Amino acid sequence: GTFLPRGMDRSLALPHLLNGHSGPLTLLIPANALLVGGDAADLKLNVVATHFRGDRYEISAHLGETLQSPLVHFWHDRAVVPGEQLAVRIEQSRLKIFEEELSA
């Protein structure tokens, strides 16, 4: 199946995770599910902020092309300039689906 995040114009293929679910769902993307770089990248993140935190950087980026796309936060070993795009792969086995929408 596919999952269309609110604010994105592209669906994510999640065949093993959805297992016949339909209707509103919440997708949890743990930090260890985002694998930055590499040839197997299947998405682009658009970086909006970088903050140095001790020995690493906290990155905020949109998962998609628009400002309405979901915002994700994750740790990275180097500074990334706002506006930069990062190629990422999502490790689907680490994702979680909730059958209701979680309030923000």
Image: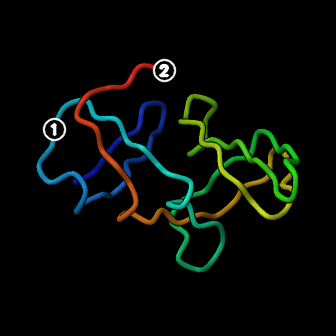
Q: Nearer the viewer, residue 46 or 93?
A: 93
Residue 94, quarter of picture: bottom left
Q: Secondary structure at mark 1?
A: loop
Question: Where's residue 35, x and y in %?
Answer: 58, 67
Q: Residues within 10 Å of mark 2 (few under 14, many from 20)?
A: few
- State the image coordinates of residue 45 (x, y, percent, origin top left): 64, 51
Percent of width and height locating residue 14 = 30, 57
Label 2 to label 1: alpha-carbon separation = 21 Å
**Residue at screen point 56% across, 54% down:** 31
Please name the colour scheme applied to the rendered image.
rainbow
Q: Identify which residue, 77 or 86, lies in the foreground.
A: 77
Image position of 38 with respect to 4: above or below = below
Q: Residues within 10 Å of mark 1 (few under 14, many from 20)?
A: few
Q: Which residue is mark 1?
A: 22
When asked about the image quadrant of residue 44, the answer is bottom right
**Picture disc at residue 77:** none
Tag 1: amino acid: Ser
Mark 2 vs 1, N-terminal side: 1
Left or right of 76 on screen, residue 7:
left
Q: Residue at x 37, y 25 (%)?
A: 102
Q: Residue at label 2?
A: 104
Query: Amino acid under label 2?
Result: Ala
The N terminus, quarter of image: bottom left
Q: Quadrant of residue 65?
A: top right
User: Quick check: 90 left or right of 17?
Assistant: right
Q: Nearer the viewer, mark 2 or mark 1?
A: 2
The residue at the point 53 percent across, 77 percent down is 40
